[in-house]
Image (cartoon, helix red, strand yellow):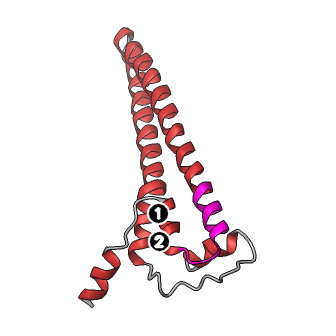
Amino acid sequence: MISLLAKGASKIVSSWSEYFEVYFKGDGNTQQILSKTFGIISTVLWVVLGIVGAIGAVYAIYLGVQLARAEDQGKRDDAKKHLITVFIAIGVTLALIVIFNVALPALISAFADPDALDIPEKPDGILQPILSLLKA
């Protein structure tokens, strides 16, 4: 049991491209397409995180100025609620992107046995290898 865990721990990956290199034993072209596709998705998600972070920071500064300039308690409370909402939105966006880009490949690779995956040498389509890797 311990040797099986040690064997699986050495194959934990931290990105989708590594995941397809280690766990995909099918056609080389399909592996390359999957690796590039998930690499593009990952890059786009990191860019989205940067954009959301920048827009959130600008909006948080704007709300902070509104909070400082507010004359009555109602406006202060309203600005405070919006500020909290901005921080929650940025946090959730960060968490989802990190989960998809880092945690999901690591979790799947930690519990998958690369020798037990039933991936055909010539898959019928692009979705079939992904479903086989995820055991769906």
Place of residue 32 in the rendered image (x, y in percent of width and height, measured from the top left): 61, 62
Residue 46, above or below 69:
below
Looking at the rendering, which quadrant does residue 31 occupy? bottom right
Residue 6, given in percent of the width and then of the height, sits at 27, 80
Q: Which residue lies furthest to the right in this view?
A: 124
Question: Seen in the image, is 73 located left or right of residue 55?
Answer: left
State the mark number for residue 18: 1
Give the total number of marks visible in the rendering.
Answer: 2
Q: Is 127 left, or right, of 115 in this rendering?
A: right
Is 38 in front, or is 52? 38
| Towards the viewer: 65 or 39 | 39
Point out residue 3 in the picture as x, y percentages from the top left corner: 26, 87
Residue that carries the numbered disc 2 in the rendered image: 22
- Confirm or deny contact between disc 2 and disc 1 (CB under 8 A): yes
Residue 136 % position (x, y): 60, 79
Compare residues 50 and 34 and report the one nearer the observer. 34
SS at badge 2: helix
Res. 13 image quadrant: bottom left
Q: Which residue is drawn at 47% across and 22% down?
A: 59
